[in-house]
Amino acid sequence: MITTSGLTKVYESRGRQVTALDGVDLHVREGEVFGVIGQSGAGKSSLIRCVNLLERPTSGTVTVDGVDLTALAGKGRRAGKDLRRARSSIGMVFQHFNLLSSRTVKDNIELPLEILGVSGAERSRRALELLDLVGLADKAKSYPGQLSGGQKQRVGIARALAGEPKVLLSDEATSALDPETTRSILQLLRDLNQQLGLTVLLITHEMDVVKTICDSAALMQKGRIVESGTVSELLATPGSQLAAELFPVSGAHTGPDRTVVDVTFHGDAATQPVISQLSRTYNIDISILGAAMDTVGGRQIGRMRIELPGRYEDNVVPVGFLREQGLQVEVVEETLTEETVVQDAATLLVKEGAK
Ligand SMILES: Nc1ncnc2c1ncn2[C@@H]1O[C@H](COP(=O)(O)OP(=O)(O)OP(=O)(O)O)[C@@H](O)[C@H]1O
């Protein structure tokens, strides 16, 4: 539904050039919720603003629903009729809502329809329908100043949906909201995605947002996409930074001669009693050092850090057993803390003494 190819944005700022996007290739499928996460300055806002051509890319292309927006924009500085029409199939939700304070809630929602030249009666019908959809049927005549942050964002979402878009872009839509309101807005976005088949591209700096509603995610660093895929694909990618941040597990080796492994559960494997099977089959005691389990898109998913007695060479077969069950297994290197160094030295001295 959304494809960017080699998307580059270079800003000129006080004689200096800042590369905000450095050849971004993004592929968002129809009907999915796709999250782009990254730290401040990574280029997320530039990306989302280039996707609907609010910002002109320096180079590269943006295609939304089969229409090459960059080619349309190339026709002239002022967005032509074709670009305006193409843009009306893209709704945008902003962090600070961007509502007009002098207009009622209903009039705010009608604004994009006015611009599209929709008749008064039709605008009114559509605005009331959208207010109902976002759960604010009783607030049509209120002004933005009389609403809570969460309600304002619901109005922002209703306005974004006025042109019946296929794509919704969300620029940190929940960053200004408290955790509970954030959950309700994310739930609304998820419901709209499912009810209307809406494709959602959102940018965020919060991993929880990705975990709560995203089917797919990309990690952005210094203007580049460094990882991307469905949540399941990411979890199945050894060494994935996003997977580790989505499901962080910690816990260090409790002593020398121990094997610590991170086990990732997803799909059917998540519901199998693999740990007890492992313990019974090989007659070994397993310690759970850390775990992060959750339900993503209605499926159980998670990671567990476990410790087995013996060095890795002694555990090749049990580790192979876990892999055979369809689990992803990564062996965690022992980090030599001061404590383990002292312990190792003490063990060595005892052994030397015994000789
Ligand atoms: N209009 C502009 N003029 C000059 N430089 C800009 C402009 N907009 C963004 N930048 C620079 O481009 C880089 C990427 O900024 P961008 O706002 O896209 O990042 P971001 O990931 O959205 O960050 P944040 O989460 O803080 O909004 C930054 O170095 C920023 O200073």
Image (tube, rainbow, N blue to C red):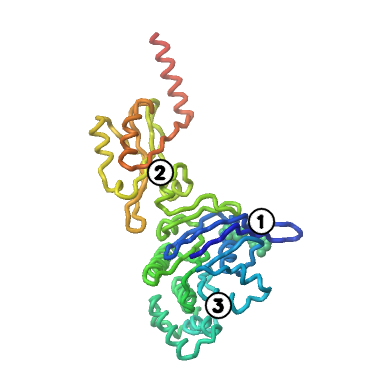
Q: SS of the residue at dot 3? A: helix
Q: Which of the 4 image quarters holds residue 278? A: top left
Q: Residues within 10 Å of mark 2 (few under 14, many from 20)?
A: some
Q: Position of residue 111 (x, y in %)?
A: 53, 82
Q: Position of residue 76 (x, y in %)?
A: 68, 74
* In the rendered image, the vertical position of residue 102 relative to residue 338, given as above or below: below
Badge 2 amino acid: Val
The residue that label 1 is drawn on is 19
The residue that label 2 is drawn on is 249
Taking 69 as reference, is 242 left or right? Answer: left
- Residue in front for this viewpoint, 297 or 142: 297
Spatial CA span between label 2 and label 1? 34 Å
Quadrant of the rendered image holding ligand 1: bottom right
User: Mark 3 and mark 2 in contact (Cβ < 8 Å)?
Assistant: no
Could you tell me which residue is drawn at 37 percent across and 39 percent down?
305
Badge 1 amino acid: Thr
